[in-house]
Structure formats: structure tokens, C-alpha cells
Image (tube, helix red, strand yellow):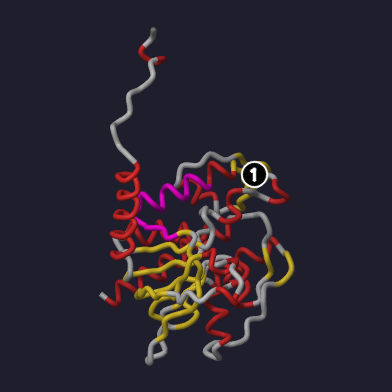
């Protein structure tokens, strides 16, 4: 029989060893990232790009994602068709993460969504960013000097439990900067607004591809001391039009917010 067809003999590892490896590995990393340089809330395309670029500068980055998967809408394009479009110059980010694409008309590129998304996740992790998925944003940590200094989190399943039987307090983690990459809902900035610490959010406008992406990148940056925004959270915060299933602006918004964050962190140091 060919060696390739032989049944492999697995290491003699039991259930308790598996459980111990999970618990101890998770606990060690969780404890280490109670404080970070940057917490990015939302691991869609803009959040992942930001995490990649900031972590490459050797800053400590934690990505917090409420879903069990990362990537948001980058896995799939419009109408459940898994091709993602990118308008120039957004393809430069695809070049960075070595994702092939095709130019289908002048300045418009199409790529395979699952491939592009998996490569972006991999490059963010390879750069050193850590991930806390199935984790729900609950509130901001706020200081007397008017600066955002972290976030309050809980397990995502808690949100689906009836209030009358749920009494599980959240916990807080701290950071020098928080980036709101939560998409249309702009959860972090909305929380500031609800507390009267920021203006009322106008919400994003209707779809207008040609105007939306340039506006998105232009308005990306720090919206409150210690709190930055990228991706669709920017559109919601400033009333900008949405761009639909084209991702160049999202990718470049992630790059811009990363550079803004790096500049702030460099000044702090």
C-alpha cells in the first residue's frame, strides 16, 4: 500500500489536554490585551486594513468583532454574488495583499470575494493584530479629560437572551485609541451621541458611487479625542452617500485611519 494511503497515527492526546490548551491559550491572550495601543471595533474590510497597517508599525492592536467570522461584506459582493468590485486607486490594496483581479472597464476591477477577504484577514493576523470575535461592543470607556480610553464588551449571545433572565455585567478593556469600524450603525460614535457627548448623527445618504468613496476617504479620521472612524461609520457620522458593493473606498479609508492613528501614537510616544 502506498504511504500516502496509510491511516496516520495521531498523537496520544485526550480531551482534558485539548480543553486545557484552549482555556490557557485564550486566557493568556485575553489578559495580555486588556490594554492595547488601538482597539478596532468591527473587522470588516476597513477595520482589517487598519489593523494590518497599524500592527506593522509594531503597535499593539486588538480587533473586536461581534460575529464569529471576520470580513463583513467583503466575503460577498452585491446580491449574494461573491465577486467584489474595486474602483481605482483601491486596487493598490489588492496589490499589497497579493490578490489577483481583472480590469473589466477603465478604472473598475473585479476580484474573488472569498479569496480577497481571506487574504486580508491573513495579512492582518500576520502583521500581529489579535482578534476577539463573538464579542459585542456595549459602551465606551470615557475619561474626565473628555477622551475615549477604551470600550466595554460582552459576549455576543448575551444580546439574544431575554432581559428578564439576563443579568451579566460587561467588562472593560482599555486602549490609547479606539477606531469605529462598525459599518452603517457606527455603534461607538452613536454611543457618544446618545450620551450627549457628540452631535446627532445624520445617517448615511442614498447610493451614489461616484461621490461616496472620495467623500468617505476625505472624512476618515479622528472624530473625538481618542475615537477615530473609518468605513461606513464615516458615512453615517457625516451624512455621506453610500457606495454599495464597491470596496475601494473602504480599503483606502482603512489605510487613512491607520496613518492618522499611527501619527497620534507616535506623538504620544
Q: Which residue is mark 1?
A: 83
Q: Residue at x 52, y 89 (%)?
A: 197
Image quarter where the N terminus lies is top left
Is 84 left, or right, of 128 in this rendering? right
Rendered location of residue 82, percent (x, y): 65, 44
Q: Main secondary structure of the magenta part?
A: helix
Question: Residue at image x 73%, y 64%?
Answer: 207
Q: Is residue 127 magenta?
A: yes
What x and y, as percent, mark residue 22? 34, 51
Determine the residue located farthest toward the left in the rendered image: 269
Count of number-bearing discs: 1
Frontmost residue, 31 versus 179 = 31
Residue at screen point 50% across, 71% down: 137
Q: Which residues are magenta?
A: 117-132
Category of crowding for the residue at label 1, using alpha-carbon neighbours closer than 10 angstroms: few (below 14), some (14–19), many (at least 20)? some
Left or right of 210? Residue 53 is left
Point out residue 152 in the picture as x, y percentages from the top left corner.
Answer: 44, 75
Image position of 134 with respect to 11: above or below: below
Residue 107 image point, x, y percent: 63, 49
Q: Is residue 13 magenta?
A: no
Left or right: 122 in relation to 210 = left
In the image, is 159 to the left or to the right of 58?
Answer: right
Does dot 1 land on a helix, a strand or a loop?
strand
Amino acid at each position: 500500500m502506498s504511504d500516502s494511503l496509510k491511516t496516520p497515527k495521531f498523537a496520544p492526546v485526550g480531551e482534558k489536554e485539548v480543553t486545557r490548551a484552549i482555556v490557557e491559550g485564550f486566557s493568556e491572550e485575553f489578559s495580555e490585551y486588556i490594554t492595547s495601543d488601538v482597539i478596532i471595533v468591527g473587522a470588516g474590510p476597513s477595520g482589517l486594513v487598519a489593523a494590518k497597517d497599524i500592527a506593522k508599525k509594531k503597535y499593539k492592536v486588538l480587533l473586536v468583532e461581534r460575529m464569529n467570522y471576520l470580513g463583513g461584506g467583503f466575503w460577498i459582493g452585491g446580491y449574494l454574488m461573491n465577486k467584489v468590485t474595486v474602483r481605482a486607486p483601491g486596487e493598490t490594496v489588492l496589490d499589497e495583499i497579493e490578490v489577483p483581479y481583472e480590469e473589466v472597464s477603465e478604472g473598475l476591477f473585479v476580484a474573488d470575494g472569498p479569496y480577497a477577504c481571506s487574504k486580508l484577514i491573513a495579512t492582518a493576523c500576520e502583521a500581529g493584530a489579535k482578534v476577539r470575535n463573538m464579542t459585542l461592543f456595549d459602551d465606551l470607556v470615557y475619561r474626565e479629560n473628555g477622551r475615549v480610553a477604551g470600550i466595554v464588551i460582552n459576549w455576543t449571545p448575551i444580546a439574544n437572551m431575554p432581559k428578564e433572565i439576563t443579568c451579566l455585567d460587561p467588562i472593560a478593556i482599555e486602549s490609547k485609541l479606539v477606531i469605529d469600524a462598525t459599518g452603517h450603525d457606527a455603534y461607538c460614535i452613536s454611543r457618544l451621541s446618545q450620551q450627549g457627548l457628540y452631535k446627532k448623527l445624520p445617517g448615511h445618504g442614498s447610493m451614489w458611487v461616484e461621490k461616496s468613496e472620495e467623500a468617505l476617504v476625505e472624512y476618515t479620521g479622528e472624530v473625538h479625542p481618542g475615537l477615530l472612524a473609518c468605513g461606513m461609520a464615516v458615512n453615517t457620522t457625516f451624512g455621506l452617500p453610500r457606495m454599495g458593493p464597491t470596496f475601494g473606498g473602504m480599503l483606502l479609508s482603512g489605510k487613512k485611519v491607520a496613518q492618522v492613528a499611527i501619527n497620534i501614537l507616535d506623538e504620544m510616544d
